[in-house]
Image: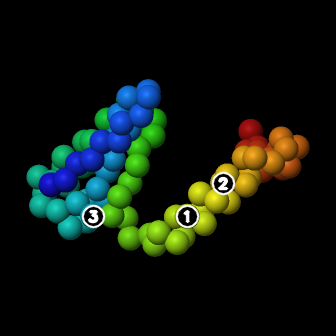
Amino acid sequence: MTSTIIITEQGSIPTIDFSLITKGSLDEQSKIISELCKACEEWGVFRVINHGITNDLVERVFNAADEFFSTQTGRQGRFQAKT
């Protein structure tokens, strides 16, 4: 099983190998799910690899997010969740 950790100035961001959830042994699946829970509890964020989404689509989503978050707050406000 491969487990990757990305080092940042703030620490290590957990990386989850999604292929092991669907194709790994029961032990691998259990370990990955535990790592996923831990990442959510301790970090609130994680990176997913081997998820089957094309690099092109991932890049387009990141570009759209960059564009959205670089716009004025007023435009972003239209997309706020209603509470």
Tell me which amino acid carries mark 1: Glu
The vertical placement of 81 against 21, above or below, is above
Left or right: 7 with respect to 67? left
Mark number for residue 59? 1
Compare residues 75 and 8 and report the one nearer the observer. Answer: 8
Q: Secondary structure at mark 1?
A: helix
Q: Earlier in the sequence, mark 2 or mark 3?
A: 3
Q: Residue furthest right?
A: 74
**Residue 11 picture location, percent across and down:** 38, 29
Q: Pointer 3: what residue? A: 19
Q: Quadrant of residue 1?
A: bottom left
Mark 1 or 2 closer to N-term? 1
The disc, 1 or 3, on the residue closer to the chain's N-terminal end is 3
Q: Is residue 36 visible?
A: no
Specify the color scheme. Answer: rainbow
Q: Residue at x 17, y 62 (%)?
A: 24
Callout 1–callout 3 Cβ contact below 8 Å:
no
Kind of residue at disc 2: Ala
Tell me how far mark 1 sits from mark 2, CA to CA.
10 Å
Res 45 seen here? yes
Amino acid type shown at disc 3: Ser
Q: Distance between the Cα atoms at labels 2 and 3?
A: 25 Å
> Which residue was labeled with disc 2?
65
Q: SS of the residue at dot 2?
A: helix
